[in-house]
Amino acid sequence: MNYFELRDGELYCEEIPCRKIAEELGTPVYIYSRRTLERHYRAFDAAFDGIGHRICFSVKANSNLSILRLFAGMGSGFDVVSGGELFRAMRAGADPERIVYSGVGKTKEEIRAALKTGILMFGIESFQELDEINKQAGIMGIKAPIALRVNPDVDPGTHPYISTGMKKHKFGIDIAEAPEGYRRAASLNSVEIIGVTCHIGSQLTDISPFIDSFRRLRGLIAVLRKDGHLIKYVSLGGGLGITYKDEEPPHPSEYAAALMKEAEGLDATLVFEPGRVIVGNAGILLTRVLYIKDTAHKHFIIVDAGMNDLIRPSLYQAYHHILAVGPHGDSQRVADVVGPICESGDFFAKDRELPEFRPGDLLAVMSAGAYGFSMASNYNSRPRPPEVMINGDGYHIIRRRETYEDLVATEFPPEGA
């Protein structure tokens, strides 16, 4: 459930009509519902009551400081994949002992920053990375807590760009090589083995790939413990999907019940790294119609938001439901919703049956809370939109709209150029 709803044809977020935000702040603009964020986090966390677990929100899904601070205040940890995300998590008040550092390309500087911060553990993605973390920890005179990220070769049945757990992917260490990897780690002086991690992909709508990968992981854990390795934490990643169109993903309680059954007797703390399932349906992108353009083959609705603001439809051919923000008649028309970017790939919908929009009308691109603003850019030298969090009948600007001056603030042309 989320707190975006139509009331007499008018789209509301909690107790505020979305039109009010557009009138006061302009468009495009991202709008988030605090009640939805809180509800979704609690639903996921509570689903695992009765078993030792930690929730580490995936920062890459939405990295706004206000959202991270909200989750930190609710007891969440964080899954980070860069030094910048680590910086954001700490600025938001994160407990460093609840931070997991994932990602295949950690630099020396990022490794040292994470060691200095005192994170829970690194997810090791390659043997060379293992050696580098051991080297940097040795230089600092400390031990680095680590868990190898295991690639179980499970097909998650999702978009190939967000599938991460098969042999052909860049992520993790082949499960067949993992025992040797742990023996190698145990021989090093400056790392401490504390767990194992696994993540197979994003936007999964079926529990079976999770169960399959967990069973393979349990078999590995038995081997590792027999070899004398301490496995205190088992990270199962994130990846639980949401409804964008007609998907029917399992509720977190169903997902949790299945995994908890598989975890019986495991004697380890389960770590989860949800992102999209918590924030995806808690945010929308509001945009205004600029022009209507008809050709011999197409009816175009041209809006003021572009692929630089929300790239998922262009990058993944992802579906986002589009709603009229205000009352409309019953007339419908097949149309493409496109933006102002100079790319044919700049679209939010293609051949979609939509209301007869007119210039000045407001549209809401739904389910934009995850991988929306966090993937936004300044392509075509467009300032990024503001982000707003609604709480009941009030709202806060949690990121202001960028200006043209912001676009050039970090550029320093040489004298005379």
Image (cartoon, rainbow, N blue to C red):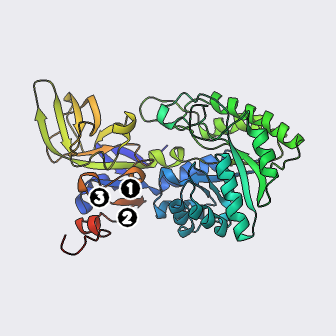
The amino acid on which the numbered mark 3 sits, given as a three-letter code, is Ile
Q: Is residue 222 above or below residue 69?
A: above
Secondary structure found at label 2: strand
Pointer 1 residue: 15
Mark 2 vs mark 1, CA separation in Å:
21 Å
Residue at point 65%, 35% (across, down): 254
Where residue 303 sits in the image (x, y, percent)?
Answer: 21, 45
The amino acid on which the numbered mark 1 sits, given as a three-letter code, is Glu
* Neighbourhood count class around disc 1 (C-alpha, 10 Å): few under 14, some 14–19, many 20 upward: some
Q: Nearer the viewer, mark 2 or mark 1?
A: 2
Is the Cβ of the residue at disc 3 closer than 8 Å to that at disc 2? no
Q: Which mark is residue 21?
A: 3
| Residue 235 visible (yes or no) | no
Image quadrant assignment for residue 405:
bottom left
Q: Which mark is residue 327?
A: none
Residue at point 27%, 67% (across, down): 408
Q: Is residue 323 above or below residue 96?
A: above
- Which of pointers 2 and 1 lies earlier in the amino acid sequence? 1
Q: Nearer the viewer, mark 3 or mark 2?
A: 2
Where residue 352 sits in the image (x, y, percent)?
Answer: 27, 29
Pointer 2 residue: 399
